[in-house]
Image (tube, grey):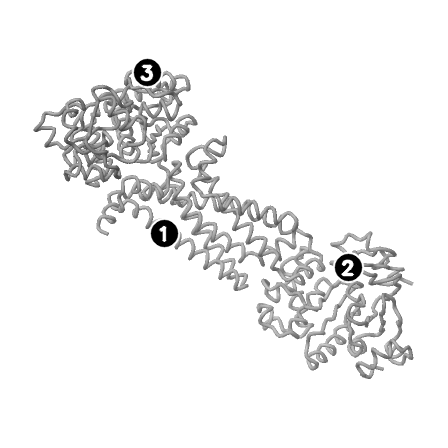
Amino acid sequence: MPAPAIEFRGVSFARPGRPRVLDHFNLTVEAGDVLALVGRSGAGKSTLLRLVNRLLLPDEGAVLVQGRDTREWEPIALRRSVGYVLQDVGLFPHMSIAENVAVVPRLERWSTERIASRVDELLELVGLPATEFAQRWPDELSGGQRQRVGVARALAVDPPVLLMDEPFGALDPLTRAELHAEFRRIQSHLRKTVIIVTHDMGEAFALADRVGVIEDGTLIANDRAAAVAASSDPRVRRLLDAVPVIPRA
Amino acid sequence: MTRLFSFWLSHRSELASLFGQHVLLVAGSTLVAVALGVPLGIFAARRPRLASPLMAIASIVQTIPSLAMFGFLLPVPLVGGVGARAALVVLILYGLLPIVRTTIAGLRGIDPSIREAGVAMGMTPGELLRQVELPLALPSIVAGVRVAAVVGVGSATIAAAIGAGGLGEYIYRGLSMVDTTVILAGAVPAAVLALAVDAALLWLEKQLSARRRSGSRRAVATIAAIVAGVVMLSSAAAARRASGAIVVGSKNFTEQLVLGELLAQAIEHDAGLPVDRRLNLGGTLICDRALVSGDIDVYVEYTGTALTAVFHQPVSNESREVFETVRTLYAKTGRTLLPPLGFNNTFAILVRGADARSRGLRTIDDAVPQSARWRAGFGYEFVERPDGYPGLAKAYGLRFPDAPRVMDLTLSYRALAAGQVDLIAGDATAGLIKGLDLVQLEDNRHYFPPYDAAAVARAGTLLRYPQLRTALERLSGRVSAADMRAMNYAADVEHRDVAVIVREFLARTR
């Protein structure tokens, strides 16, 4: 049995002078799983992701990625093996779409030819034909197109782990539904280990195999999507009632 | 207008050289300010606690008037003194503030999510800086460089005061000769240069903000090529100083410009040595400091000025004695005072030429009997100074019926010529004495301290070039007060070219 892709062991974390965001938090994500973490704003969801790629270190406990404590990882190597799709995309406005996608491969000193073919492949994968989009600029793209570029950029060096922070939050419902379908298609090919954080239970069901619910710094539910949808816990029900979406079977 | 163009035409090689020096001063100082200011701004942007005091210091530096800054730097070793080096230091200090400020502003203005994306993607701090932060802050930084360069073009004109050359030389020369054409000859190209620099960098800024990287690369390359080209042309134009040239200095008024040119032509012609002219170097102390530091090799000083202003000795009225005292003091500090040129630029008691001829007036004593019926007109300073009117009246027993009329010195010449007053105290070598047909009465009781003009040179330079000493000694006794007046008149009143005036004088007296 291989080590879980990501593991939180009794992790506590607080911003200096603020109450604890995470309190002895435990979580295991198996390789190839898509886990959606749902919680209200300020529940500590983004903090969780930043603990995975060592943008933050835990005050107590340990975060393990591929079986290794993030404290033991060399931070640069860790971050390059963990794709990260940000809430507000964070595309570099001074780089073309192709250059944005090529950032990590260039940091990894790939050859020019290898980068070029990889960029074409990725843009194709996220539904933005390279011939049309490679040489365009971030400010010329729609929000949905930018988010697709964000996904392509995160996947560039084929990292085993992908972290997504409210990835489709700012999009209109139609575009969001389109991208949800697109994500499932891509994931069915790539089988990455994915953690998505969102405040929207509907999005969680649309994207994830497993759904976790965070409240007050601890995990109050963590199960297969269908099981969470049937939960009788009133705290989980409140979130479910907010967005009555039927889960995938 | 026509005068301006003909001035440029007749001075075209000098103009090119001054323009070149100006560009080099600005380009050099701006490049160094960028090399220092951008890293400083990066450093400060990451340490907010440091940024505020740093900006405060930079702002204070900025508020020091540039002329005062040159003054502060004069006695500072290595960076101070006179010449291009000190000017570069001052211009760099001025350029730092806008560059540091815009670097900080540019870096702080970057969207935090963009920076976070870079970190999360596994960029090292260096990679983040080079690939994300600097490119995004670049338009802001270029805006700072533009401010620095444009301010630099203006400040560099002031650098002429400490002999750094540049277009300011014309401006200062024009100011000291009260010649608008000469002022414009420097001011117009400086303004054009400032506008050109502003336009070019503004264009670059716009190209960079357009976020089109390939386009901005081309823009940066274009500007870099232009700067490189201009700097190369400028260096060629500015390369006035041949190696081993004798550097001749002068103070910043017409007579000194004429005397500086006189030394220069005498050295070129008689000693056969190349000369670098650093004329118009501000006041006595700047020239003295430049001579001590070796920035200049020779200039003309007045014995009375050297005695009081340079060596702080009490005044003496005995010309020979003053000369010997000053010569000894100079010798003790590694400098050689050459024999006097032949005129004494002291206070001159002046009367109308017509009166002097009709009444046979030659000395001040001759005028004493007339004073009971005369009106006198003096400048403010002469009325107040102990060695001015009070002492003069006592020494000669002058008694005017009314108190002397106090008026502007320059106006007093005209007042005398127009018959409003009958006797004034002017400068012995003023060009107007000749222009207005005035006559200087001899100070036969030696009341005024002597201000004999004499070249003072670095002893080391004289030893190295014996022919230099010979050439300078040949000027001894050759320039009478009347000669000096005539040359000042030609420059001040007739606005003739100083180099031509001196060439004619040397040819006439050779």
The image quadrant that residue B12 belongs to is top left
Assess disc 1: are there few (<14), some (14-19) or many (≥20) residues with their C-alpha within 10 Å of its C-alpha.
some
Name the chain under label 3.
B
Q: Where is residue B248 in the image (x, y as percent from the top left)?
A: 33, 30
Local SS, label 1 = helix
- Mark 1 or 3: the one toward you: 3
- Rounded to the nearest angstrom, the CA distance separating label 2 from label 1 is 56 Å
Q: Is B248 on the left or on the right of B144, as rendered?
A: left
Name the chain under label 1.
B
Looking at the image, is A20 positioned above or below residue B485?
Answer: below
Q: Of all residues shown, which one is farthest toward the front?
A: B401
Query: Which three-letter amino acid code belongs to the residue tagged 1?
Result: Ala
Local SS, label 2 = loop
Disc 1 target residue:
B191
Observer-nearest residue: B194 or B121? Answer: B194
Q: Is A109 on the left or on the right of B1, as rendered?
A: right
Q: Of all residues shown, which one is farthest toward the left?
A: B358
Observer-nearest residue: A188 or B438? Answer: B438
Query: Which three-letter amino acid code belongs to the residue tagged 3?
Result: Glu
Q: Is B79 on the left or on the right of A151, as rendered?
A: left
Whether labels 3 and 2 share one chain: no
Q: Where is residue A33 in the image (x, y as percent from the top left)?
A: 83, 70
- Mark 3 or 2: the one toward you: 3
Assess disc 3: are there few (<14), some (14-19) or many (≥20) residues with their C-alpha within 10 Å of its C-alpha.
few
Disc 1 + disc 3, Cβ < 8 Å? no
Q: Which mark is residue A85?
A: none
Say whether residue B466 is visible.
Answer: yes
- Rounded to the nearest angstrom, the CA distance separating label 1 from label 3 is 48 Å
Q: Which mark is residue A53?
A: 2
- Rounded to the nearest angstrom, the CA distance separating label 3 from label 2 is 85 Å
Disc 3 target residue:
B324
Picture residue at 59% right of the left edge, 72% below the top = A131
